[in-house]
Structure formats: structure tokens, C-alpha cells
Image: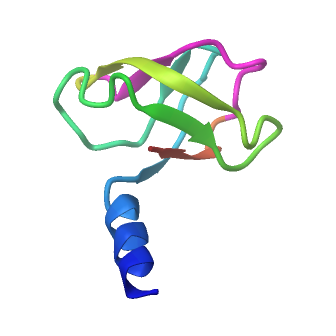
Amino acid sequence: DATAATNLKSSTETMITGLTTGIPTTTNIPTNLTETVDNQFGGRVFILRTGTFARQAVEITAYNGTTKTLTVNALTGAPAASDAFVIV
């Protein structure tokens, strides 16, 4: 129905996509994000979309706007550089 479609569209507008960069670890994820404000994504959820650990989801505990690095609760393994992710 139209309301459901509108609600779905509204919810996807807050999703952010990106790629891992550098040498990610299980808790520190360098990214290609452009946001410069520290802790902009704290409390949101980081979901890997590609790579060995695709579909893992963990809470974001911090974000460094200078280094573009996310700090997350531990993944079961480190993603590779250039793995795609979404923040919800």
C-alpha cells in the first residue's frame, strides 16, 4: 500500500553506504566515509554487505571524523579493504 511504500522510502533515506579502506581490524574499521563530525554514527548499526564476513551486524561505538574510522563491537573476523557496508 502507499503508506508502507512511503515508510520504506523514509527509512532508507537514513542508511549510509561505504567501503572499508586501509587495514580493518575486528573493532576498528577505516572507511571512505566523508562525514567530519566525531561520533556521528555512534549507536547505529554497521552491517557488512560483501566479503568473508558479509551479513554480520554490530553496533558502532565511536566514529573519528578526522581518520574516518568506525569503532565497533567486535566482528568475528576482520573485513578486507574494499568490503562494502551499510550503516543503519
Q: Is residue 6 left or right of residue 58?
A: left
Color theme of the render: rainbow
Compared with 22, 73 (above or below) is above
Quarter of the image holding residue 41?
top left
In terms of depth relative to the viewer, which is nearer, 82 or 48?
Answer: 48
Side of 25 relative to 9 (left or right): right
Q: Which residues are magenta?
A: 67-80
Q: Is residue 12 above or below residue 61?
A: below
The residue at 16%/29% (across/down) is: 37
Task: Tell which of 26 and 58 is nearer to you.
Answer: 58
Identified at 25% across, 21% down, the residue is 39
User: In percent of the image, x 71 and y 22: which residue is there?
Assistant: 78
Q: Position of residue 77 (x, y in %)?
A: 77, 20
Instruction: Inspect the magenta stretch and tell me whether residue 9 lies in it.
Output: no
Left or right: 29 as drawn, with respect to 55: left
Q: Residue furthest right?
A: 52
Counting from the top left corner in percent of width and height, residue 28 is at: 52, 16
Looking at the image, which residue sits at the far bottom? 2
Q: Nearer the viewer, residue 78 or 87?
A: 87
Q: Provide residue 15's location: percent of width, then percent of height.
A: 40, 53
Residue placed at 63% from the left, 36% from the top?
81
Residue 13 occupies quadrant: bottom left
Q: Is residue 71 above or below residue 53?
A: above
Residue 88 as seen in the image, left or right of residue 10: right
